[in-house]
Image (cartoon, rainbow, N blue to C red):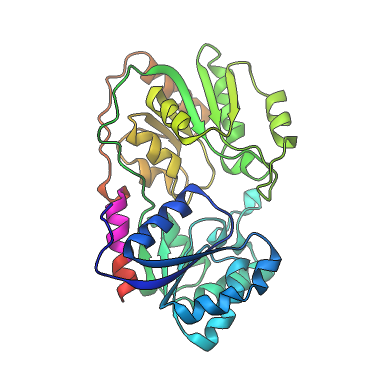
Amino acid sequence: MNSKTNYNKNIFYIISGETGFKKTDEEILKSLGNVRKMDYTSKTSYFNPIVWINLIWCQSIVIWFASGHAIPVILLNYLFNKRLIIIAGGFDVANEPTMRYGAMRGKSRAIIGKWILSRAHSIIAVSKSNYQEIVENGRVNSPKVHLIYNAVSKKENHQHIEKKQQILTVGEINEETYLRKGLDRFIKVAEKLPLIQFIHIGKWTNNKGIQCHKMINYVKSISPSNIKYLGFIDKKELDNFYEESKIYLQLSRHEAFGVSVVEAMSYGCVPIVFNAYALPEVVGNNGFIINNIGECKQAINKIVTGLPNLTIDFNPKFNLTHRQSEFERVLAN
């Protein structure tokens, strides 16, 4: 990623809960200007007077997700009329009734979400699939939606070690993600391939993201012995698992992008993903796109029984420098 450019506006960056991709965007924004961040961790944050101060100070407001934490700033922005950019990349624009997932399934949440999107000067989509959800579910005019893929740091010089015959997936485990992230499918595939080691990495939480063992205890109780659940681990350990794992499995029913898939691909893992939402778009011709458990098992067998090593054609639009340049363009408009 390029160092700080000549573009140097004041940017008020608003999130609700820290994640890796939000931190990545914070660093990108800091390379483009002066950034003040506010993390809405509780309802008391809505009444923090620093919001007024930051709205007076900034030229642009960037908010991750068109959700409730955006409401106070948007209401105040009726007075200030600062440039408002919303990154809509997941639950906020989804409508997946089979899983009861998405803010756009109807009623008050959908009304509020559409109003939030209507107040934005620009909306950033993180994939073509996500772009379509924003336009169709959010009823947004397409000219104000900008496609800027999520990004990861390309591992140009990582050491090449011999891959283990193990299958990795990464993601949070709670009652909501169990179906959305396809953990039930992951378990079924592991049952059909008892001689292969499966590894799951990710936090064990409740639906509010707070540490909780209720769902992981259930998941472990129905899982075969060839699955290891490691929970949350630090970035260096995670990178080691990407480095040594031959296959990365993502059997989600909904993904607006799939950051972990791209991270795995950057380490040379062969991705196998379900044919759902953004996953085929992200993988392209670099792995296997499957439609059922049987196809998944066949793909795994092809890889572990001698499929020549695939050369991952890393999409340059997934690079940090590309997201940075596209952010700069949107902020400058």
Image coords of residue 300 (percent x, y): 43, 22
| Residue 117 visible, this angle | yes
Vertical position of residue 47 compared to residue 316: above or below: below
Q: Quadrant of the C terminus?
A: bottom left
| Residue 126 visible, this angle | no
Q: Residue at x 57, y 75 (%)?
A: 51
Labels in figure, total: 0
Q: Which residues are magenta?
A: 319-327
Q: Is residue 169 left or right of residue 328?
A: right
Image coords of residue 293 (percent x, y): 52, 28
From the image, give the main secondary structure of the stretch colored magenta. Answer: helix
Vertical position of residue 156 compared to residue 17: above or below: above
- 103 and 236: which one is in front? 236
Q: Residue at x 71, y 36 (%)?
A: 215
- 194 and 213: which one is in front? 213
- 295 and 28: which one is in front? 28
Image coords of residue 248 (percent x, y): 43, 30
